Amino acid sequence: MATAAGFDFRRWRLVLLGGLLVGIVLFAAIFAPWVAPYSPFDLDVAKMLQGPSAAHWLGTDELGRDVLSRAIYAARISMQVALLAVTVGLVGGTLIGMTAAYFGGLVEQALMRAMDLLFSFPAILLAVVLMASLGTSVLNAMIAIGIVFIPGFSRLARASTQAVLRQQYIEAARSIGMSDIRIIFREILPNITAPLMVEAAVAFAYAVLLESALSFLGLGAQPPDPSWGNMLSTGRGFMAQAPWLSIVPGMAMFICVLGFNLLGDGLRDVTDPHMRE
Amino acid sequence: MDIRSRALQDGRPTLSIRDLTVDFPKRDGAFRAVDGVSLDVWPGEIVGVIGESGSGKTMTALSTLRMLPKRAVVSGSIELGQRRILDLSPADMRKLRGDRLSFIPQDAMRALNPTMRIGRQVGEPLVLHRNLSFKAAVSRAVDLLRAVHVREPERRVEDYPHGFSGGMQQRAMIAMGLALEPELIIADEPTTALDVTVQAQVLKLLKEIRDREATSILFITHDLGVVAELCDWVYVMYRGKIVEQGSVERIFMDPRDDYTKMLLASTPTLFPREAAI
């Protein structure tokens, strides 16, 4: 615990490390126009497929565009998609899970069996199917990935709500005449946010991967908009001549996903009372 | 000796329970938790219901609040003032709880929401039943906390429950119960979780409230010492039935029922008498 005596570095080190990596990616995403040395769209055919150099730190792609700049702009898309997708999953899943746990009975059965149905599809397959029916665009990718996340969040919210419902303060809230809706939002929700936030951080990493996978398959961000997924997809064709085209977006993805995973794990440990000494 | 002094002042009891029966259906028949209980609480009277665990005393209290588990089957009649509790709609019942009828639970620590400031919680009944704003409710909470002798209430309303000691938490619960000057307070072993000195303070406080506000109190307990200290009239419950009732003096000096005698004999005293059974 961070006490007045001092900050317990060991307890928070995962959070700090994860936060640092996430911070780098977020910084690049938010300040892309100032951070990136070139425009991600500027063609320079004379300089295509050049290796790393002083002018282009991470080389150029098959159309002579600066790979570093494209990777930085790609972070924007990834972060936008992940943020909206996690929000959709978190809000939808939490509402469904809390409703199911609170009312129980048939309501719970209906909602949770529907969640099981969604859960039974492999995530990427579900996302691809949803994209196929919604159409190809970044916004639809966000929605599709968000829907993929709903069952996981709903199960977590349901389990956490069930634990909170056994607490006496719920009975106390009822004894002063609180309505169901008010109990759900004022008494239960604040008490289940910690596990949901941890799950959200982990889901964020997963959303980045899913978005890249969809873009790799040509279902997410459309060229010329840069995304780590479609950069990897193009780079695949030049693996022998220009390996940096694949390595750079791959590394970017790696740093981003690692950062969010460390952050999620670290937050779980910090918020878990059993890990406290 | 065995005269119910308060009953003579007013023609109508605050709470009147007649032939209350609570059954819990089981695979083979039903479990009868409360078996034909009748009891009265008169205005300004503190009535004790004493019995061992499983005697049905808490079920009797929860029936009055209509907060029994859903599967419980209730029959008989419960009247609070002119209202027939068991016939009220759930919405009307909700309006009654925390307003005309309030509940003080056993373990205040667990009955307070850990994520909400004390002031907000103590003021909650005012928000629910009197449409007070958050700010107005908190400023009323200051007065309420002062009335239950919490020191520096202006500062304390900003605290979270974990910053309160056990006795203070119970005071906060009592303050919440008093918020709307209810006709009846039902207290379910409110002092069991407290140590003896704090217990004495809380009992004194309840008495003081009764004297000041003329509130009726139904006090559920298994503790004979508490009954002797606090109550005007006592009902002894055993296996879902009321086996004996009388003034505190009469019950202690001249117990008539065998179970009551056993109960009295089982209390360790400095000068043990020969057990009657």
Image (cartoon, coloured by chain):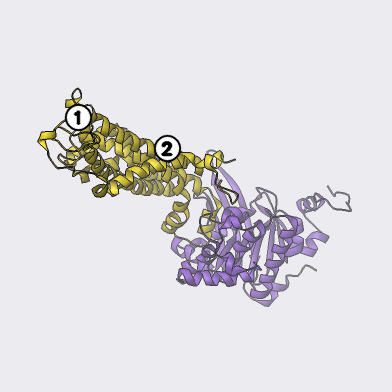
Chain colours: A yellow, B purple
Q: Say if residue B182 shows up in the picture.
A: no
- Percent position (x, y) of residue B86? 51, 61
A73, B264: nearer the viewer: A73
Mark 1 is surrounded, within 10 Å at the Cα level, by few (under 14), some (14 to 19) or many (20 or more) other residues, namely many
B90, A19: nearer the viewer: A19
Chain holding disc 1: A
- Percent position (x, y) of residue B46? 68, 66
- The kind of residue tagged 2 is Leu
Q: CA distance from mark 1 to mark 2?
A: 28 Å
Query: Which quadrant would the C terminus of chain A be assigned to in this image?
Result: top right
Query: What label does residue A24 carry, if any?
Result: none
Of marks 1 and 2, the one in the foreground: 1
Q: Say if residue A241 shows up in the picture.
A: yes
The residue positioned 73% from the left and 70% from the top of the image is B4
- Percent position (x, y) of residue B84? 52, 65
Q: Against B257, is A76 above or below?
A: above
Q: Against B106, is A146 above or below?
A: above
Residue, far top: A240
Location of residue B50 by image quarter = bottom right
- Residue A17 is left or right of residue B66, and the answer is left
The residue positioned 72% from the left and 55% from the top of the image is B195
Q: Earlier in the sequence, mark 1 or mark 2?
A: 1
- Residue A119 is left or right of residue B31, and the answer is left
Q: Which residue is mark 1?
A: A235
Residue, far left: A45
Location of residue A111 by image quarter = top left
Query: What label does residue A262 carry, if any?
Result: 2
Q: Against A175, is A227 above or below?
A: above
- Percent position (x, y) of residue B236? 71, 56
Q: Secondary structure at mark 2?
A: helix
- Residue A107 is left or right of residue B197, and the answer is left
